[in-house]
Image (cartoon, rainbow, N blue to C red):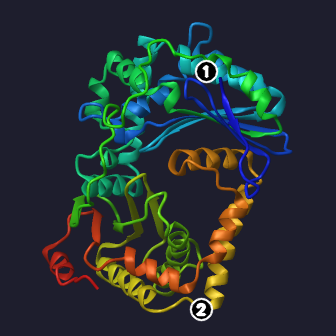
Amino acid sequence: MANTRRHSLKKPDSFKKTVFSNRLTLLSERQKMKSLAIGIWLKVGTRYEGAKEAGVSHFLEHMLFKGTPTRGALEIAREVDRVGGEFNAFTAREYTCFHIYLLNRDLDLALDILSDILLNSTFDAAELERERKVILQEISMVDESPEELAYDSFFEQLYGRHGLGKPILGSESSIRRMSRGDLLKFFRKHYSPERTIVSVVGDVSHERIKKKLKALTRSKWIGRPKLRSKMEIGFQPAPALKIGRWWRVRPLEQVHIVWGVPGPTHSSKDRYAAHLLNVHLGGGMSSVLFQEIREKNGLAYTVYSSISPFVDSGVFTIYAATSMHQVPLCLKLIEETIVKVKKDLLTQEEMKSVKDSLKGTVLLSSDSTESRMFSIARNEIFLDQHVGVEEICEQLDRVTPQDIRRVARKILRQDRRSILFLGPKPRPQMISRLKPLKFL
């Protein structure tokens, strides 16, 4: 039996949730649009990988496109292309998502393909070897993308051997030694109904979707174990973030700087204030970091801040790329900007600007079935509840300048700052110029 419930009046009637008897969760939000977005979300990502499994979640993501007993890889691609749709997937540190974007009329096709790859993928040996080469090329691309490499290196330093610090793609050595048996073992352990969310947004009814999910809602998926504890599936609590300053040598034209401190978790009560703080600091061309470092001083082409929240951890980062001789000045301006944000209250004009910016982003994304599909699934994974667009905007409106300053002082702590530099080997004079840097 399935348990279906309607949410309170504060939540739109268009949203519904059903948890089936096998513990698979269906979320749907009805919108009067021609497009339909469907996602299959698995509560597994890099943080669940063991020491010898680096990159297995991402490898599996690739392999589920490579065929079932009734569909080859080309047939899967053709069926979606034939109706003008898009089929893609991505792996994150705490989840994996397979999603299809097409017209409402093609609901049956989308659910049939997604159910088929989830239940019946064959993991063909020849396809696996071809995809291994593709992933190795993907890893090489990251090695040639300094910004991505800097962030991967920074997370590795912060989290150490914990899964949250592992590169999502894995390493060249881990991918080369990964066997079909390794993939199947991880797949059977984690790809089970109680760890699966189906998220659907478009002009289709919840009841119709339920009827089309029979294959996924049967009591047991063949070869998948029953519900286990977090520890049994590889969940390890996040460690305290390491504090340090690291220089990774690469033959680059610029030095890529990642400055970071512990940030809010997904469910933090301060998350709305933290996101507004992020917009103010480095969320766009009008942000204070962009204006100070690029517009006023011409030190960097790219500079921004960002928040990476997780279930039980989080990181608040600032990124900039600049020439070697300008590294000390760039860092000085970053930290002076932070000191000012911690000291001064935002003006009413600044508050209106950051709120309008973030609410505008939220409201614009609500016009996209794909964005809404992503949003309702992530809310289920991290908050175990539905959060509507109106509620988000109301919460943002409640944030005061005092809240932002309080959160800035809480997050941007003087004793928790870490910095990673990625670039050419620094001369001793440069190191001596950085050594006097103190926590401001």
The N terminus - image quarter = top right
Residue 189 versus residue 156: which sits nearer the camera? 189
Tell me what residue is drawn at x 74 percent, y 60 percent. 364
Asked if residue 258 shows in the view, the reply is no
- Mark seen at residue 329: none
The answer to whether residue 108 is above or below residue 33 is above
Classify 10 Å Cα crowding around label 1: few (below 14), some (14-19), many (20 and above): many
Judging from the image, what secondary structure is the residue with disc 1 in?
helix
The residue at the point 27 percent across, 60 percent down is: 241
Residue 358 percent coordinates (x, y): 64, 69
> In terms of image quadrants, where is residue 135?
top left
Q: Nearer the viewer, mark 2 or mark 1?
A: 1
Q: Is residue 13 left or right of residue 356?
A: right
Of residues 264 and 358, the one nearer the viewer is 264
The percent position of residue 296, horizontal first and vertical second, equals 50, 87
- Kindly identify the amino acid type of the residue bearing the numbered disc 1: Leu
The picture places residue 216, in percent across and down from the top left corner, at 61, 21
The part of the image, by quadrant, that contains residue 94 is top left
- Residue 384 lies left or right of residue 436; in this view the side is right
Badge number at residue 347: 2
User: Would you place residue 65 above or below residue 304 in this image?
Assistant: above
Where is mark 1, residue-wise?
216
Q: Who comes first in sequence, dot 2 or dot 1?
A: 1
Which structural element holds mark 2?
loop
Count of numbered badges drawn on the protein: 2
